[in-house]
Image (cartoon, helix red, strand yellow):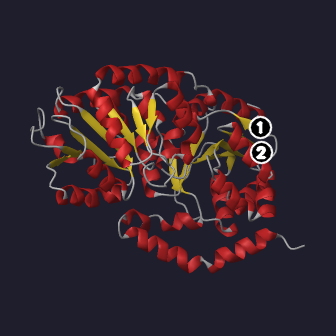
Amino acid sequence: MLNPRLFYTLALWLLLPYIFLRLAWRARRQPEYLRHIGERFGFYSAHGSQPVIWLHAVSVGETRAAQSLIARLRTTYPGHRFLLTHTTPTGRAAGEQLYGDGVLRVYLPYDYPFALNRFLRHFKPQFGILMETEIWFNLIHACRQTGVPLLLLNARLSEKSARGYARFARLTRDALGELAAVAAQTADDAARLTGLGAKDVSVTGNLKFDIEPPPAMLELGRRLREQFGAARKVFLAASTRDGEEALLLDALQQVHIPGLLLVIVPRHPQRFTEVAALLEQHGIPFRRRSAMEQQDGAIAPEIRAVLGDSMGEMFAYYGAADLAFVGGSLLPYGGQNLIEACAAGTPVVVGPHTHNFAEATRLAVAAGAAAQVQDSGGLAIELQRLLDHPDALREMHSRCAGFVESNRGATDKSLQIVASITGN
């Protein structure tokens, strides 16, 4: 029987023209997609003289989730250079912001054997770590062939994604079987991965629970709150996705809180201008976060919204808010990370679509740190209720810390798995 990975590779070659078109299409909004294109095919100028430990984090969420793990690995392996690979420009920018020159940052090549072999020959990693849901068939096989132990950590796999991989059962089974170790966030994730062919899957919890809000960001949040106005109620709409901002603005028309200030932070920076135009269309006086750098004192009372057009300040936004909606959940995007809000002590409201963070959402709601609504109308009702009742909001605030603290520990468990593979 022919190896299905050969057919997969052939399909990739047929898709090569589409890859260039897709890069050009994305570059219309985000020109960074046209930079470092050679890296996506295994051509690199970055070098490291020390032994390399490699970690792949697709975009911003995975890059931030890896913080606690990278910090501990750097302590455990002091004589090594750390290589952080990404797929998106925003992930690469987040890596630069979080780690500076402390790590090498490049794009992971597309899943072509020639590009992957160039990548592995160039950096010669002692071992690699894939974060969350990254199953690249040729990458995993190339690492196995070259003797690079490859681990899948903090893995999550929704039912929808599992059904997709099951359509290529043998290809998926072979790839998962070549991984050195698999550690899942939840028992459900572990069961789905095992069902697809992964062996000896551990359940370690979610690394995102181990992230500590940086003191500098909490201090910035305090200063932002002073600028927003200490007496005003502040509602943060965090990591919103395309189509959600219009629903939020309609919902807020039903909320009657004197002086309420909306702080809206789109998930993708290329949408800042689009959301600014939407605020203008709704006749909402707003101020850009980027314009506040040159200002002192509170923003004017007539300003009803702040557009968070900055990168890497989400903890500060959470620290400055009374209540946060975490986006990607009003429309079927699967939700974004609500753990960071709770770690900053900010109560959370989410919509019905949270399958990317299903277990974290369930635990947060059960702990009383978050509330879940079914639509924008329900969101308006919940905002009115919570912002009208400070005692209820304070109770949610007090439950945030317990929710986060009770779910910590994934970093320690992940390090134990790394040690069992590497012998260190």
Left or right: 232 with respect to 300? right
x, y percentage for residue 142? 74, 59
Q: Is residue 316 above or below residue 398?
A: below
Q: Secondary structure at mark 1?
A: helix
Q: Quadrant of the N terminus?
A: bottom right
Q: Nearer the viewer, residue 376 or 102?
A: 376
Q: Nearer the viewer, residue 385 or 94?
A: 385
Asked if one can make out residue 139 in the rendered structure from this viewpoint, the answer is no
Q: Residue at x 22, y 31 (%)?
A: 233
Q: Nearer the viewer, residue 25 or 285?
A: 285
x, y percentage for residue 247? 33, 53
Left or right: 163 with respect to 341? right
x, y percentage for residue 243? 36, 58
Q: Is residue 330 above or below residue 171?
A: above
Q: What is the CA distance from the residue labelled 2 to the residue labelled 1? A: 7 Å
On the image, which quarter does residue 120 sit in?
Answer: bottom right
Q: Residue at x 61, y 38 (%)?
A: 80
Asked if one can make out residue 311 in the rendered structure from this viewpoint, the answer is yes
Circle 1: residue type? Ile
Q: Which residue is mark 1?
A: 421
Q: Which sits earlier in the primary sequence, circle 2 or circle 1?
A: 2
Q: Secondary structure at mark 2?
A: loop
Left or right: 248 with respect to 332? left
Number of residues whose C-alpha sits closer than 10 Å to that of mark 2, classed few (under 14), some (14–19) or many (20 or more) = many
Contact, CB < 8 Å: mark 2 with mark 1?
yes
Q: Nearer the viewer, residue 59 or 261?
A: 261
Number of residues whose C-alpha sits closer than 10 Å to that of mark 1, classed few (under 14), some (14–19) or many (20 or more) = some
x, y percentage for residue 45? 52, 59
Q: Quadrant of the C terminus?
A: top right
Q: Which residue is mark 2?
A: 180
